[in-house]
Image (spheres, rainbow, N blue to C red):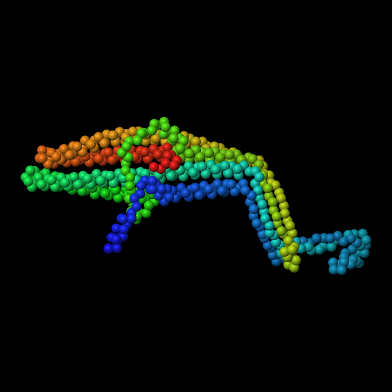
Amino acid sequence: MKYFLILLFLNMIFTKNYNLSELINIALEKSPQIKLANEDKKISLSHSIEARSAALPRIQFVTSATRNYNVAGQPIDFPIPFGVLNPVTGDPIPTEWNPSLQETEIIPDEIMFSMGRDYSGLYGININQTIFDGRVFAGIRASNKFKNLTNASYDSQKEEIIENTKISFYTVLLTKKVTEVFHKSLKRSKDNLFNTKLLYDSGKTNELELIRAESMVKDQETTYSNAKKNEILALEKLKLTIGFNLSQNLNIVGAFKDSIQIIPEFNEISNQLLAQQPRIKQLEANHDLLQEDVNSYLSEFLPSIELTGSIHKFQSQNKDNFTWKNFQDNSSLSINIGLPLFNGFGSTARIMRAKANAKKAYYHSEDLKNNLLLDLRNIHLSLIEANEKINAGNKKLELASRGYNIANDLFLTGMTTQLELLGAEVSLNRAELNLLQAKYEFQIALVKLSRAIGKNTTGNTK
């Protein structure tokens, strides 16, 4: 137990405070979403390399060795004029049964020829180079489009990660501020209970007022405890969002901006959205990729030209003559031209389908633009509304603070009741919480605006 307390104390001493920029950097390195996005980029790179490899020469080393255990023979009739020759001595053999055959007929002699050798071997290099193939070049262009699609998808993932990190950060900040509000309220309630006891002991107030003061303290303790719970849960959610180790302590530093920023014009931010939003770029890249599919299928009607070459060493010998010096050169060079004539309308059907998919992608892109602009309008109006809430909230907080001070002074002089003081306390708490909520809403609207116009992936992550 002693060692546990020591470790806990050391952990508290060396715990680092993180601001929003540092949390974003952690999220862009460790969050599960960014890890998935990085793997998608690797997949995109592999597709690009694979598509380009089709245009490069293909070089292959080949080798083979064969051992024939039984070599088949082929009988061949050789014409021997004027008789038959002895296959051993080569001398003529008279045909005594028909002497005239030697003078007038050609005598065939059947000889068995071997159709192979005991051993054969081959080694060398084969080279294939595509000179022209429409599908290869369409694949290279498609790989570039796919790369653009992946980059836009990666930026879209970054926008979402940064937005979620900011929202989680400001949610933790809000819960911390709410906890502070209820902590101050609890302290005021305890001070009020102490003052009420003094008044009760001096006979200036009744027991009912004392009971109300004690009840107020208990209510504030419950509310404060619930606020602490929400703060802990919000902090754990932030850890999960940025990929932080849940067992480590995480302290954040930051504050809501008190100064009200100048809200940009809607036309200005709508132009930025259309120019920078990664989701729009993603769908446009997807449309370009599907359009390249059309070109790929159109290339099926074009001829293909391929150059093929080989440099080999080959020999086929019986066992005694099968040596390295008997390998002979066996090289060739050829050009192959293929011209498609008819494939049963398969290419035509694929072109029709590819064009339809490209059209769908275009319509989807246009629909997304309209929906994003509508969402941007909502964000813009939310900024204006939150701005007005902050202005009104500051004034209400000022009035509520004055009201509580007046009610507390009147209660201490016996000129008002505990109920009036309780009402002033509730009004003060509500004013503080409403102002915090307005600042939170304004900050979240700014976060959503940054994501909507693609500001997070253009170098600004503040």
Query: Which quarter of the rendered picture does the C terminus lie within?
Result: top left
Q: Answer left or right for 296 relative to 31.
A: right
Q: Which quadrant holds residue 317?
A: bottom right
Instruction: Give the x, y percent position of residue 249.
Output: 33, 53
Seen at 27% across and 49% down, the residue is: 229
Q: How many marks?
A: 0
Query: Which quarter of the rendered picture does the N terminus lie within?
Result: bottom left
Instruction: Give the x, y percent position of residue 162.
Output: 40, 44
Residue 22 in sight? yes
Establish if 247 lies above or below 48: below
Instruction: Give the x, y percent position of residue 33.
Output: 42, 48
Instruction: Give the x, y percent position of residue 22.
Output: 38, 48
Q: Which of these two is toward me, 330 or 422?
A: 422
Seen at 29% across and 48% down, the residue is: 231
Q: Which of these two is toward me, 115 or 12?
A: 12
Seen at 17% across and 45% down, the residue is: 189
Seen at 33% across and 33% down, the residue is: 384
Establish if 278 lies above or below 237: above
Q: Which of these two is toward me, 354 or 23?
A: 23
Q: Which of these two is toward me, 367 or 311?
A: 311
Residue 357 in sight? no
